[in-house]
Amino acid sequence: LAASVHEAVKTLLPASNFSITLYDSATSMISFPYHVDEQDVDWAPRKLGKGLTSYVIRTGRPLRTTPEIVADLEASGEVLGDGVQSVDWLGVPLRSKQMVTGVIAIQTYGNSPTRITDKHTSIMSVLAPQVSSAIERFFAELEIQKFKLGIDRSESAVFITDTHGEIQYANPAFEKVYGYAQEEAIGKNPRILKSGLISLEQYKYFWDTLLSGGTVSGELTNRRKDGTLIPIAGMNSP
């Protein structure tokens, strides 16, 4: 993902030296999951400090610097020297729900024929929300994958239905517990597990509660594919 973002940015900006910084407000730590740089080699995670990246995170505003601007910021105590001195540096905050969650930055060194200008600041400010959205989607998909992996490895039978009550997913343990292969269960109604020992009123309460956003927990008696009755203690959530 980050490499793709970098390639897209390079078509619009002088971004041979490019980094994505993520900020964890809970720990005040900044990390650099992606960085390509001709000279700077120190990309270890660190506490929010007084470098240029930290300045952007603290202020929540884009910052374009030249050596003269950096000197003024250092003289005022706003920033301290951090990393290799660049000719131009530009950092724009990344936001999620109005909170600063990171920075995208580009910089040039003495061997670059191109200077970073206010025009580049405007372009990167337009790109930043798109980068933030892409990062959010990436992490959301990663969490879903981790969640699914946990369910897949669980020894408890787990199945997921749609709002019509049709099974859309069943984990490997479902087959071990109930005897139905995943392909047999998908598209079926959980009534295939009905033991006949639970009253219609209880089943109605069960589904009404789930469809209204509630959670149902307790012990039920279900029926395996071979007809065996088994007690099941568990929780069902919408």
Image (cartoon, grey):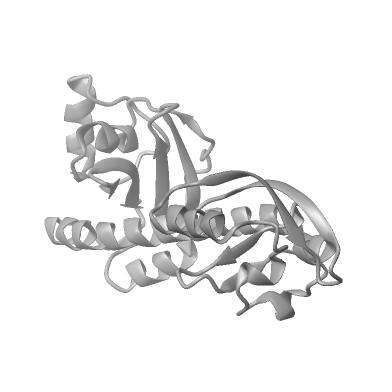
Residue placed at 29% from the left, 41% from the top? 100
Residue placed at 62% from the left, 54% from the top? 146
Q: Is residue 36 visible?
A: no
Decide: is 47 above or below 179: above
Q: Is residue 174 visible?
A: yes
Q: How many marks?
A: 0
Question: 92 or 215, which lies in front?
Answer: 215
Q: Is residue 188 left or right of residue 37?
A: right
Question: 183 or 128, which lies in front?
Answer: 183
In the rendered image, residue 35, in percent from the top left (x then y), is placed at: 48, 52
Displayed quadrant of residue 23: top left
In the rendered image, residue 73, in percent from the top left (x then y), is placed at: 20, 28
Q: Is residue 219 left or right of residue 53?
A: right
Decide: is 230 above or below 48: below
Q: Is residue 233 left or right of residue 228?
A: left
Residue placed at 58% from the left, 72% from the top? 168
Decide: is 26 above or below 158: above
Question: 31 or 214, which lies in front?
Answer: 214
In the rendered image, residue 6, in percent from the top left (x then y), is placed at: 41, 64
In the rendered image, residue 184, in percent from the top left (x then y), is placed at: 73, 80
Question: 174 or 192, which lies in front?
Answer: 192
Q: Is residue 117 left or right of residue 80?
A: left
Residue placed at 45% from the left, 52% from the top? 209
